[in-house]
Image (spheres, rainbow, N blue to C red):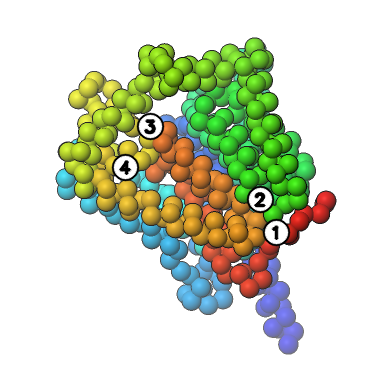
Amino acid sequence: MREKSQKAARLFLTKDILEILWNISFLLLMLAVICFGHIQWGTNYYYYFTFFFFVGVTMAETLLRRNWYRQMYLPLQTVWYGLFILLAIISAFWAPSFGMLTLPMKRMIQNLVLTYCLAQHVSSKDRLEEYIRIVLAVSLFLAIYLLVRTPFDQWFSGFLGRGTGYNSNDIGQSLAVCVIFAFYEAYIRHKKFCYAIAAISMFTVFLTSSRKAISMSILGVILLVAFNFRTRKYMLRVLCILALAALLILLVFQVPQLYRVIGIRLETMVEYFMSDKDVDYSISLRHFYIGVAKSILREHPLIGIGMNNFSDYITRYGDTLAYCHNNYWEIAADLGIVGLIVYYWFYVYLFFKLVRQVFDGHKTALVFLTLLVQFLVFEYGIVNYYKTQSHLILAAAFCAVAINDDEESEPERLPAAEEKP
């Protein structure tokens, strides 16, 4: 009996240590992905270390489970992304440039491994919350790190992070996710200190001058309030958050520092769509790329011209390699209608699952439905099919759906009318 107790104690201790190690490995991985991912490909040794550390810890944790061979499974998310990668590889048979096809492939295969590991570990609501907390911690570190690294007199010069080697759009999108997660923890989970994290992240998003990131942040907060329809005084809350969003936009145009950072860019964007097509070169160029992608789809409607070969095709119009800046049209040009179906069916699956779970009262469905809607909207302006953080979020959304389905008999439901915490 004593021997059995000691064995059980050792097993518990091993599981506890592995849980801690997994959290540490994922924290280090997210630092590599979000904060230190700007290092040139092939020399980012910190990322390589964290990748293998994270995968190794996850596999050790999985293999040490009792009856692990019965509990290991192939997540639907892995099947989906694996099929997309397989289609991309097969497109080598008709791609004009095999070299261009291989460029995103390494990252995509790594994403497949990382998201598989995430799905193996995140099997409960506690672990899902731990995932959110780690993403929040790393994103907050990024915001503070950038503000400290940037002299104060350059905070409002626009495109924060450019001087540190970071892409301001990527920074803005990472921090927009942080805004949404922090507001979810504060507004839905009633962890009031997270309002401060949301505010710091929102402020830093504004300093990046990224129109997409600012739109994602504001729309994300509005959607969280709108989707949380079971709360007391629902319409009043929706009106209040809309008023707050309007106030933020007003401040952008009234505060000189904010106007220089982002107000001018928003103004030129509105002017572009209203009248003057030459006023915003960035938007004009993106529309040109979309037009090229449409012409490729007309010529090769079924299977496109091969993964990442839009970049090769665009060199016909100049010497510069470029991508479409639009996930829908990038995939349509590269892999045709087949590629769009293979890639986006999983988004549709998650969308309907999350909508049902929101109506069933699952809290986690609120935040991941918000993020999924953001992806569906803003992938019209970004290319996401190989972005590591985006696919980790999609994997976490799948985990939320699976956990909610598994716990349907005893779900964590939103109350019909919230009481004050």
- Label 4 neighbourhood size at 10 Å, few (<14), some (14-19), many (20+)? many
The residues tagged by marks 2 and 4 sit, at their Cα atoms, a distance apart of 33 Å
Question: In the current view of this chain or complex, which residue is farthest to the right?
Answer: 420
The residues tagged by marks 1 and 3 sit, at their Cα atoms, a distance apart of 38 Å
Residue 22 in view, yes or no: no
Q: Earlier in the sequence, mark 2 or mark 4?
A: 2
Q: Which residue is mark 4?
A: 331
Please, what is the three-letter code of the amino acid marked with disc 4? Answer: Ile
Percent x, y for residue 406? 57, 70
Front residue (pair 276, 129): 276
Please, what is the three-letter code of the amino acid marked with disc 1? Answer: Leu
Image check: 80 left or right of 410?
left
Local secondary structure at mark 2: loop
For the residues bearing labels 1 and 4, Cβ distance under 8 angstroms? no
Please, what is the three-letter code of the amino acid marked with disc 3? Answer: His
Local secondary structure at mark 1: loop
Q: Which residue is mark 3?
A: 325
Front residue (pair 342, 270): 270
The residues tagged by marks 4 and 3 sit, at their Cα atoms, a distance apart of 11 Å
The residues tagged by marks 1 and 4 sit, at their Cα atoms, a distance apart of 38 Å
**In the rendered view of the protein, which quadrant contains the N terminus?**
bottom right
For the residues bearing labels 2 and 3, Cβ distance under 8 angstroms? no
Q: Which residue is mark 2?
A: 228
The residues tagged by marks 2 and 3 sit, at their Cα atoms, a distance apart of 32 Å
In the image, residue 289 sits, relative to residue 332, either above or below, namely above
